[in-house]
């Protein structure tokens, strides 16, 4: 799932769902306009009730998904800062460069897993060196180093967990499906009334698609228009270099 999210161009991630929602709104509006002469008072009341219920369900799903995505985004952002602080005590330039390379390299599953393995190897190497130094020179106090290394290892697992466990794809599919149905039904209601053109339904569809696209973009931690700020890692690199 992670590789698929990284591989999708952000313009495609925004554009395709928007076109689908707008197409549903316009198609259903035309269907509603075609059935306008056959509508009755009871039918209009039922359509209004169903339209309100569908839009309420859509709003509920958008709010739920946005809250989940925002929580993951904040976890990822905090993990970058915490990891930079832990690595600062270790003061290992190679480890810092690895974090920067992960951010800059193409975001596919192969490079992501390869960078994770390199990071694990560096952590194992540092741990062996700490044990060897402590055995050879027991008078040295390396408690702070060991604690920081252990914290860096734990924070990497936190960061990997947040990166690998975004909003489930099934939830996004359900959200898009509800959006298509709800906005399409709103278009049908507009066409059935026959008092408005395609613009109101199109505006509603564009707004809904933009909000869902924004949520999906936030769930992509290293690609898209909204990304996690890696400045703490770059600041750490500059500090170690000086």
Image (tube, grey):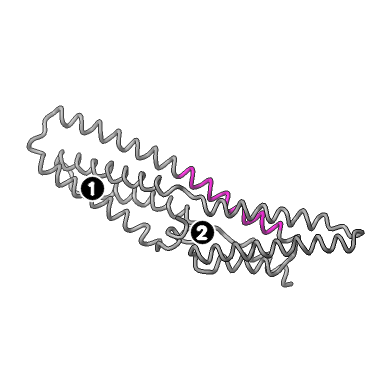
Q: Residue furthest top?
A: 42
In the rendered structure, the answer to whether residue 39 lies left or right of residue 205 reads left
72, above or below 15, in the image: above
At a point 87% along the width and 57% down the height, the residue shown is 141
Residue 80 included in the magenta stretch of the image:
yes
Quadrant holding the N terminus: bottom left
Could you tell me residue 92's position as x and y percent?
72, 66
Q: Which residue lies furthest to the right in this view?
A: 139
Could you tell me residue 182's position as x and y percent?
28, 41
Distance, label 1 to label 2, CA atoms, is 31 Å
In the rendered structure, the answer to whether residue 186 lies left or right of residue 236 reads left
Could you tell me residue 85's position as x and y percent?
70, 57
Could you tell me residue 123's position as x and y percent?
70, 61
At a point 58% along the width and 49% down the height, the residue shown is 75
Q: Earlier in the sequence, mark 1 or mark 2?
A: 1
Secondary structure mostly seen in magenta is helix
**Label 1 secondary element:** helix
Q: Which residue lies furthest to the left in this view?
A: 37
The picture quadrant where one finds residue 146 is bottom right
At a point 15% along the width and 30% down the height, the residue shown is 43
Which mark, residue 227? 2
205, above or below 127, in the image: above
Density class for disc 2 (Cα within 10 Å; few <14, some 14-19, many ≥20) is: some
Residues 119 and 41: in front is 119
The magenta stretch is: 66-86
**Label 2 secondary element:** loop
Which mark, residue 240? none
Q: Mark 1 points at which residue?
A: 25
In the rendered structure, the answer to whether residue 62 lies left or right of residue 187 reads right
């Amino acid at each position: 799932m992670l590789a698929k999210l990284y591989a999708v161009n952000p313009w495609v991630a925004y554009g395709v769902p928007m076109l689908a929602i707008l197409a549903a709104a316009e198609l259903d509006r035309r269907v509603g306009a075609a059935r306008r002469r056959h509508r009755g008072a009871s039918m209009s009341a039922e359509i209004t009730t169903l339209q309100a219920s569908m839009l309420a369900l859509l709003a509920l799903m958008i709010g739920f998904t946005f809250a989940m995505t925002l929580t993951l985004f904040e976890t990822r952002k905090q993990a970058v800062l915490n990891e930079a602080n832990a690595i600062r005590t270790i003061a290992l330039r190679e480890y810092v460069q690895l974090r920067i390379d992960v951010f800059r390299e193409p975001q596919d599953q192969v490079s992501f897993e390869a960078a994770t393995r390199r990071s694990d190897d560096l952590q194992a190497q540092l741990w062996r060196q700490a044990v060897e130094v402590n055995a050879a020179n027991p008078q040295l106090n390396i408690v702070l180093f060991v604690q920081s290394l252990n914290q860096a290892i734990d924070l990497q697992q936190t960061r990997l967990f947040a990166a690998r466990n975004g909003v489930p794809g099934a939830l996004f599919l359900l959200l898009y499906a509800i959006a298509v149905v709800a906005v399409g039904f709103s278009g049908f209601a507009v066409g059935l009334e026959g008092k408005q053109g395609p613009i109101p339904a199109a505006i509603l569809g564009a707004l809904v698609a933009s909000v869902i696209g924004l949520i999906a973009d936030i769930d992509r931690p290293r690609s898209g228009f909204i990304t996690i700020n890696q400045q703490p890692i770059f600041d750490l690199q500059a500090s170690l270099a000086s």
